[in-house]
Image (cartoon, helix red, strand yellow):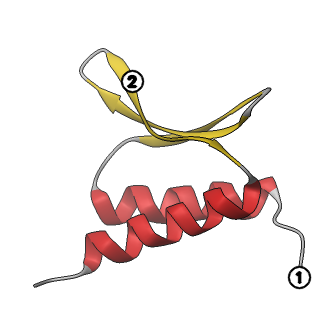
Protein backbone atom coordinates (compact mmCIF):
# COMPACT_ATOMS: atom_id res chain seq x y z
CA UNK A 1 0.00 0.00 0.00
CA UNK A 2 1.27 3.43 -0.92
CA UNK A 3 1.70 6.09 1.72
CA UNK A 4 -1.04 8.75 1.90
CA UNK A 5 0.52 12.21 1.89
CA UNK A 6 -0.84 15.47 3.26
CA UNK A 7 -0.79 16.88 -0.29
CA UNK A 8 -3.08 14.07 -1.46
CA UNK A 9 -5.43 14.70 1.45
CA UNK A 10 -5.50 18.44 0.76
CA UNK A 11 -6.38 17.75 -2.89
CA UNK A 12 -9.15 15.33 -1.86
CA UNK A 13 -10.43 17.91 0.61
CA UNK A 14 -10.59 20.49 -2.19
CA UNK A 15 -12.46 18.00 -4.39
CA UNK A 16 -14.95 17.23 -1.61
CA UNK A 17 -15.43 20.94 -0.90
CA UNK A 18 -16.17 21.61 -4.56
CA UNK A 19 -18.61 18.69 -4.75
CA UNK A 20 -20.52 19.69 -1.61
CA UNK A 21 -20.23 23.48 -1.94
CA UNK A 22 -19.03 23.56 1.67
CA UNK A 23 -16.00 25.29 3.15
CA UNK A 24 -13.92 22.30 4.29
CA UNK A 25 -10.43 22.01 5.71
CA UNK A 26 -8.21 19.49 7.48
CA UNK A 27 -6.90 19.92 10.98
CA UNK A 28 -4.14 17.80 12.52
CA UNK A 29 -4.07 17.10 16.26
CA UNK A 30 -2.33 14.67 18.57
CA UNK A 31 -5.20 12.18 18.10
CA UNK A 32 -5.36 12.31 14.28
CA UNK A 33 -6.94 14.22 11.42
CA UNK A 34 -10.22 16.09 11.55
CA UNK A 35 -12.31 17.30 8.62
CA UNK A 36 -13.86 20.62 9.60
CA UNK A 37 -16.81 22.45 8.00
CA UNK A 38 -17.57 26.14 8.46
CA UNK A 39 -20.92 26.69 10.20
CA UNK A 40 -21.88 30.31 10.80
CA UNK A 41 -18.95 31.97 12.54
CA UNK A 42 -17.64 28.65 13.88
CA UNK A 43 -16.77 25.16 12.71
CA UNK A 44 -18.27 21.70 12.93
CA UNK A 45 -16.15 18.53 12.80
CA UNK A 46 -17.48 16.06 10.23
CA UNK A 47 -14.94 13.34 10.97
CA UNK A 48 -12.49 13.22 13.87
CA UNK A 49 -9.45 11.26 15.10
CA UNK A 50 -8.83 9.65 11.70
CA UNK A 51 -5.65 8.16 10.32
CA UNK A 52 -4.48 9.33 6.90
CA UNK A 53 -6.06 6.31 5.22
CA UNK A 54 -9.35 6.76 7.06
CA UNK A 55 -9.39 10.44 6.16
CA UNK A 56 -8.71 9.62 2.50
CA UNK A 57 -11.68 7.24 2.36
CA UNK A 58 -13.91 9.67 4.27
CA UNK A 59 -13.16 12.50 1.83
CA UNK A 60 -13.61 10.24 -1.21
CA UNK A 61 -16.98 9.07 0.13
CA UNK A 62 -18.06 12.63 0.88
CA UNK A 63 -17.27 13.73 -2.68
CA UNK A 64 -18.94 10.69 -4.25
CA UNK A 65 -22.03 11.05 -2.05
CA UNK A 66 -22.38 14.71 -2.94
CA UNK A 67 -22.42 13.96 -6.67
CA UNK A 68 -24.87 11.04 -6.42
CA UNK A 69 -28.35 11.82 -7.69
CA UNK A 70 -31.14 9.50 -6.51
What residue lies at 89% left-to-right and 78% top-to-bottom?
Answer: 2
Side of 46 where 48 appears, left or right = right
Q: Is residue 47 above or below residue 62?
A: above
Q: Residue furthest left?
A: 70
Side of 61 where 68 appears, left or right = left
Side of 70 where 66 appears, left or right = right
Q: Residues within 10 Å of mark 2 (few under 14, many from 20)?
A: some
The tag on residue 35 is none
- Give the mark nearest the N terminus, 2 or 1: 1
Where disc 1 sits, the SS reads loop
How far is disc 2 from disc 1 in space, using C-alphas?
A: 33 Å
Q: Is residue 12 above or below residue 13?
A: below
What residue lies at 88% left-to-right and 82% top-to-bottom?
Answer: 1
Where disc 2 sits, the SS reads strand
Q: Is residue 35 above or below residue 67?
A: above
Q: Residue furthest top?
A: 41
Between disc 2 and disc 1, the foreground one is: 1
**Residue 23 coordinates in the image, percent (x, y):** 38, 41
> Which quadrant holds residue 34?
top right
Q: Which residue is mark 1?
A: 1
In the image, 60 versus 41, the foreground residue is: 60
Q: Residues within 10 Å of mark 1 (few under 14, many from 20)?
A: few
> Which quadrant holds residue 20?
bottom left
Quadrant where the C terminus sits is: bottom left
Tell me whether the residue at label 2 lies in contact with that at label 1, contact meaning CB atoms closer than 8 angstroms: no
**Residue 14 coordinates in the image, percent (x, y):** 51, 57
Q: Which residue is mark 2?
A: 43
In the image, 69 versus 49, the foreground residue is: 49
What residue lies at 31% left-to-right and 47% top-to-bottom?
Answer: 22
**Residue 25 coordinates in the image, percent (x, y):** 53, 40
Q: Is residue 49 above or below residue 64?
A: above
What residue lies at 64% left-to-right and 64% top-to-bottom?
Answer: 56
Amino acid sequence: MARVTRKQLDELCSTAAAATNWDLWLQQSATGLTVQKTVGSGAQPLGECMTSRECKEFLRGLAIGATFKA
